[in-house]
Amino acid sequence: MIPAGSLNKKLEIQKSVERIDSSGGPYTEYEKDFECWGSVIANNGQKVFRSNKYDDQVDGLVEIRFSDNITADYRIKILGEERILKIKGIYDPNGLKERLHLVYFEVS
C-alpha cells in the first residue's frame, strides 16, 4: 500500500497527439488524459543504470497509484508549479500493481 499523505502533488498526465499545421507539416501537441496525485522524487545527482549503461539524463521519478495506460510518449504537468516532466521510463517497483514509478527528465 501507498502510505496516506505520501502522494502530495496534483498531477496532470498528458498524452501526445499528432497534428497537422496549416502548411501540411506534422507536429506534436499534448493534451490532458487524466489527473492524479503523486510524489515527485528528485534524482539528487545519482546515475540510473539502464540498458547496460549509466544514464545521466534522468532528473528523478514520480510515484503514482498504478495505471496500465501510461506510455513513455506521455508527459507530466505538476499543477500549481507549472513544471513539465517528460517520461523516460515506466516500471512497477514491486510487481503488485499498487504503484507506478515514472522516470523523468524536466522539460520546463
Image: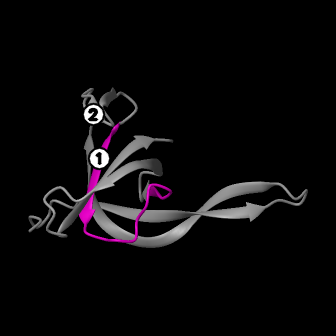
Q: Quadrant of residue 49?
A: top left
Residue 34 locus on image (x, y percent):
43, 73
- Marks 1 and 2, the one that precedes in the sequence: 2
Residue 7 lies, with reference to residue 106, above or below; the image says: below
Q: Quadrant of residue 2?
A: bottom left
Magenta stretch? 59-76
Residue 33 locus on image (x, y percent):
49, 72
Does the CB distance between marks 1 and 2 fall below 8 Å?
Answer: no
Residue 7 lies, with reference to residue 44, above or below; the image says: below
The front one of 70 and 34 is 70
Does the magenta portion include 70? yes
Residue 94 locus on image (x, y percent):
13, 59
Residue 82 locus on image (x, y percent):
47, 52
Residue at 16% across / 63% down in the picture?
A: 95
Circle 1 residue:
61
Residue at 72% across / 55% down in the picture?
A: 27
Residue 90 lies, with reference to residue 33, above or below; the image says: above
Residue 80 lies, with reference to residue 108, above or below; the image says: below
Question: For numbered disc 2, what is the local secondary structure?
Answer: strand
Question: 38 left or right of 97?
Answer: right
Does the magenta portion include 62? yes
Q: Nearer the viewer, mark 1 or mark 2?
A: 2
